[in-house]
Image: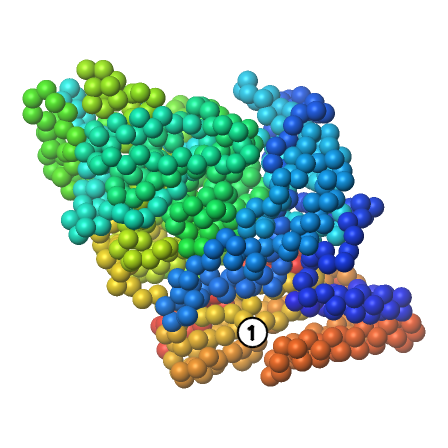
Amino acid sequence: MVRLTPNSKPGCALALFAVFSLIASARSNRPGRLDNRTIDESQLVPLSGTVRRLPHAEFDRGRVSSDMPLNRVALVFRLTDEQQNGLDKLARQQQDPASPNFRKWLTPEQYAQRFGVPDSDLNKISAWLRSRGLQVIGPSRSHTQLYFSGTASQVESVLRTQIHSYRINGQAHFTNTTDPLLPQALSAMVLSVRNLNDFRPHKHSTVRLVPHLTSHISGAHFLSPADFATIYNVKALYNSGLDGSGVKIAVVGDSAVTLADINTFRSLSGLPANTPTVVTVPGTGTAAHNGDEGEADLDLEWAGAVAKGANITYVVAGSTSQSGAFDALQFAIDQNIAPVISNSFGLCESDIGTSNAKVVQQWAQQANVQGQSITSATGDAGAADCDGDASTPPTVAKKGLSVDVPAAVPEVTGVGGTEFDGDGPGSVTGTTPNTDAGATQFWSGTTGAADAVSSALSYIPEKAWNDGAAGQPISSGGGGTSNIFGKPSWQSGPGVPADGVRDVPDISLNASPNHDGYLVCTKGSCVVGFRNSAAGNFTVFGGTSAGAPTFAAIIAIANQALQTSGLGSINPTLYAIAVANSGAFHDIQKGNIIVPCAQGTPNCPATSPFQFGFSTTARYDLATGLGSVDANALINAWMSFTPSPDFALGSFSATTTSGQQTSTTVSVDPIAGFTGTVDLTCTPPATGSITCSLNPASVSVNGSTATATLTIGTASAAVHSPGEFLWLSAGGGMFAAIFVLPLSARKRRAGFLSSLLALIIAAGFAGCGGGSGGSGGGGSSHGTAAGNYNLTITGTSGGSLSHTATVRLKVN
């Protein structure tokens, strides 16, 4: 992509410099790559956004030991604009039944060839790292990451950063306290540097030991696999011969497990033997049994319980991994281990940081074009996800509204939480376990001195999960709006906020450990049936972590039903089915994810009640998303559903500089269902002083693709003379005109370079003496700040059929 970036006050020297820079850049076919440049450390550029939110200064213990080893630090490379546009286009084609690329997934090698960094650049960067004493491990299979190791002092020296140790709640941690500095030649290539800290993502599950399936002792109910199958209508799929057979599910985690626990769980649940395969991320050491073992058991047991015929692979990060389950997630994608991935770990957006959140998105985009679908828990702290990152769950929120990553990534399906509503006849209200043995509307009772392993009778009405109570830890499903990701074009429909940002969750499933939790065998807990002794405890889990593996299992069954090797991003299909077939989802219209907050903290009201969050509404809401699912109805709808894709864009992203214009082509396709006249509108972002227009504003679609030119303008903060404004206007006009000329790509590039060259020379002459001097009638403004913005293009045909598409704008 050629960029027009004139200075606010062009002059002779600047014009001459720009001419030679333009000629030099024209020789490169791969913008942002090294080509023939050397890695010169005399010119360093900060890599912003790589410092996670630092702990309070009181926890800071100063610089880490100089010889402390840093394992598998990774340079993560960003895609060029050309690569990103190509990736976006391919992802759309893979979801379009009319495209020859429909469900033609890439292998990791094919992804590396098209979207990775060339070997020549990797070799040059590796040589530079080795010259500084670092051990180069090698690139990822996708060629989008380069791993290296070294001591803290070596890494600090090479990246010009500081790494400090912290002591938080008795636990030792470390993190970089300043943004790394990279040689200028690398700065445009690198998106982030991973593993400069050891703050691992947190699990999103809650365990509760109860002395009470339906218990023959108390009459309390807890979920067994057969109960889940009844409530969410998976049993109808089993009756049709669909149970996930032949499909793989990858579950990611960071703790060793005892496979005997999983085998015992399956035996007690009446499931056939099916021991998971364990794969450890290379270079991360041996996985140890730690506090996340119960989470791993929950995920493995319940992914295999719902998709009882699927093959489960546990991808685990070893004890020396600094990123824990995130390393496992990246490896499951990079090695294309399974078409379905379940993740129950995450960090809030502020804690992971913008650049690393974008890294996770890049992983997810790779996964999608490889045919992989990812489910991820939205968190257990209600609308206050950052407070949920604390090692001890707080009783009040202090860090403001927030959502979880990876769930907030548009290419990931975020799974929130519900709980069974006890307002039906013969049931129990509140958040205590359902202990009414006479409640036969939804649960059967027991006979004799035996627990009833399968006792659910039908679907049970649900409400948003929120077990919070005054003075008790926050315990609620996660949801809200992203501060990082813009609204994807497919996230639309009744109830979806017109807020311009990514909303979560997408769907929700039961998450309450109280009403009613998931039975789990962990650490030898299942001794007498699911109990730890003859009349002892059950181990019962809840949390949105339960929804991630169970919904991943439903996606695996969908893969089997559709006879496909993968589904890629399923979110567009989920939202489209929700509009066309509401029976596939249980619309949750009771409850909320509102949490108490500390007065004076972010987003907390100035007056009582001191709380914030979201309530359920009809159709989509920020508490439960589209609702929970009727698995049989969802998959049947999926099998008969023909996607109606949003209209295509010639480019899904654009790059410009503050004060400049850029253009791209909007292609309106008949495959989107458009016929006749299609009216086009552009909605700019709410901030940034950005304008956009379409020419023409209406196109005619009669069996072939129609096009229009989208022109995007940004505001300049500079003070200009009238002559300079005239020059900028002329330049913008010529720039836009070139893009709509019916010429070949090569001729357009040549014409563009010629026109731009002429403009720069003209500007140079003006600066040498042809200008009026001074500011004249020029004025100043705050301008469009550097950053990423999203614009929405809407096409409407016949007054009712409407599709949207999102253009990502990067302002330098």
Residue pictured at 46% horizontal, 79% vertical? 705
Question: Residue 437 lies in what quarter of the image?
Answer: top left
Percent across and percent down for residue 621 are: 36, 49
Numbered label tally: 1
Specify whether residue 387 is in view: no
Q: Which residue is mark 1?
A: 665
Q: Is residue 733 left or right of residue 551?
A: right
Instruction: Note whether 730 is above or below 412 in the view shown.
Output: below
Percent across and percent down for residue 173 are: 59, 25
The amino acid on which the numbered mark 1 sits, given as a three-letter code, is: Thr
Specify whether residue 3 is in view: yes
670 and 386: which is toward the camera: 670
Residue pictured at 18% horizontal, 34% vertical? 270
Q: Residue placed farthest to the left in the image? A: 448
Q: Residue placed farthest to the right in the image? A: 769
> Looking at the figure, which quarter contains the N terminus?
bottom right
